[in-house]
Each structure stands twice: as structure tokens, then as C-alpha cells.
């Protein structure tokens, strides 16, 4: 006799991924990091394979935290309850995640980091900028 089991497939790459990018050309350039693992960029729509690579998964954001470091130009606008903070913040919020938005016409650049909440290990980091004049 022998046992028959199921072998589960695991992604070969990282579960969390960010790519540095320009997010401007919108009235209020913004990025939304959904609590379901999806990333929505104002001029691109949903970006497949970022921030949570395997794809949408309900409440995955509660296992991760996000923060930004202001690098150049204008800082993102503060919005109560759902913005990415300078301090580590869970990826949950009023709009089903965390967002970053710049004022109309503002030019700025930030570094976004995402870490695993339980381990504190940073899993991904990338730069985002609202106008070409703030590019790295």
C-alpha cells in the first residue's frame, strides 16, 4: 500500500513586490495599496503582480505593514484614516487599504516599504514620484 497526497504549488519568487514608477498625469496622482493585495495606480489602473504577487486575497493586508519616506519635492497629502503613514501602518483602512495621493500639480518622490507584520522583515521597497521633475 502507499499513500497518495496532494503537492501544493508555491510561487517560486517573492510574495511581495514593488517596482519604482512614475504615477503622475492625473489631477491628483495616487496609489492605493488594497487590503486584498491589489495595487491601483491613478493612471494605470490595477497593476497585476504588485503589491501581493499571487493576486487578490481577502484581508492579506492585515499580515503586512507599509510606510513611506519622503525623498524630494512635495510630500503626499494627509487624509484621515486611510493614508500611508511615515510610521509602519497596517495595510487596511477606510477604502479597503492604504493610499498615497499628491495635491494637483505637486511634484514629489517617496520611498515605499512593505514589511511582514509578524517578522518585521521588509519584503519590498520602491520609489514613486508624481511628476517627471521628481524622478530619481
Image (cartoon, rainbow, N blue to C red):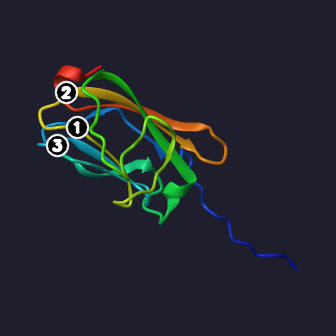
Q: Earlier in the sequence, mark 3 or mark 1?
A: 3
| Res 37 quadrant in image | bottom left
Q: How many marks?
A: 3
Q: Is the C terminus in the top left, top right, bottom left or bottom right quadrant?
A: top left
Q: Nearer the viewer, residue 122 or 106?
A: 106
Measuring 47% from the left and 42% from the top, which residue is drawn there? 66
**Helix, strand or loop at mark 2:** loop
Residue 128 % position (x, y)? 31, 32
Determine whether label 3 and label 1 are within 8 Å by CB.
yes
Determine whether label 2 and label 3 are within 8 Å by CB.
no
Q: Earlier in the sequence, mark 2 or mark 3?
A: 3
Residue 114 % position (x, y)? 49, 40
Q: Separation of disc 2 and disc 3 at Cα?
A: 11 Å
Mark sitting on residue 107: 2
Asked if residue 55 is positioned above or below residue 109 in the image, the reply reads below
**Helix, strand or loop at mark 3:** loop
Q: Separation of disc 3 and disc 1 at Cα?
A: 6 Å
Q: Nearer the viewer, residue 80 or 21?
A: 80
Asked if residue 82 is positioned above or below residue 134 in the image, the reply reads below
Measuring 22% from the left and 37% from the top, which residue is drawn there? 102
Q: Residues within 10 Å of mark 3 (few under 14, many from 20)?
A: some
Mark sitting on residue 102: 1
Q: Residues within 10 Å of mark 1 (few under 14, many from 20)?
A: many
Mark 3 — residue? 28
Measuring 69% from the left and 71% from the top, which residue is drawn there? 6
Residue 60 % position (x, y)? 51, 59
Q: Is the N terminus in the top left, top right, bottom left or bottom right quadrant?
A: bottom right
Q: Earlier in the sequence, mark 1 or mark 2?
A: 1
Q: Residues within 10 Å of mark 2 (few under 14, many from 20)?
A: many
**Helix, strand or loop at mark 1:** loop
Determine whether label 1 and label 2 are within 8 Å by CB.
yes
Amino acid at each position: 500500500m502507499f499513500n497518495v497526497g496532494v503537492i501544493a504549488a508555491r510561487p517560486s519568487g517573492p510574495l511581495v513586490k514593488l517596482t519604482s514608477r512614475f504615477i503622475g498625469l492625473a489631477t491628483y496622482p495616487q496609489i492605493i495599496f488594497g487590503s486584498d493585495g491589489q495595487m491601483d495606480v491613478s493612471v494605470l489602473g490595477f497593476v497585476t503582480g504588485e503589491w501581493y504577487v499571487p493576486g487578490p486575497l481577502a484581508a492579506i493586508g492585515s499580515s503586512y505593514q507599509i510606510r513611506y519616506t519622503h525623498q524630494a519635492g512635495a510630500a503626499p497629502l494627509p487624509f484621515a484614516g486611510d493614508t500611508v503613514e511615515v510610521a509602519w501602518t497596517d495595510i487596511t483602512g477606510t477604502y479597503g487599504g492604504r493610499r498615497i495621493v499628491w495635491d494637483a500639480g505637486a511634484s514629489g518622490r517617496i520611498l515605499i516599504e512593505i514589511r511582514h507584520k509578524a517578522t518585521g522583515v521588509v519584503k519590498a521597497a520602491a520609489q514613486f514620484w508624481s511628476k517627471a521633475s521628481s524622478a530619481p
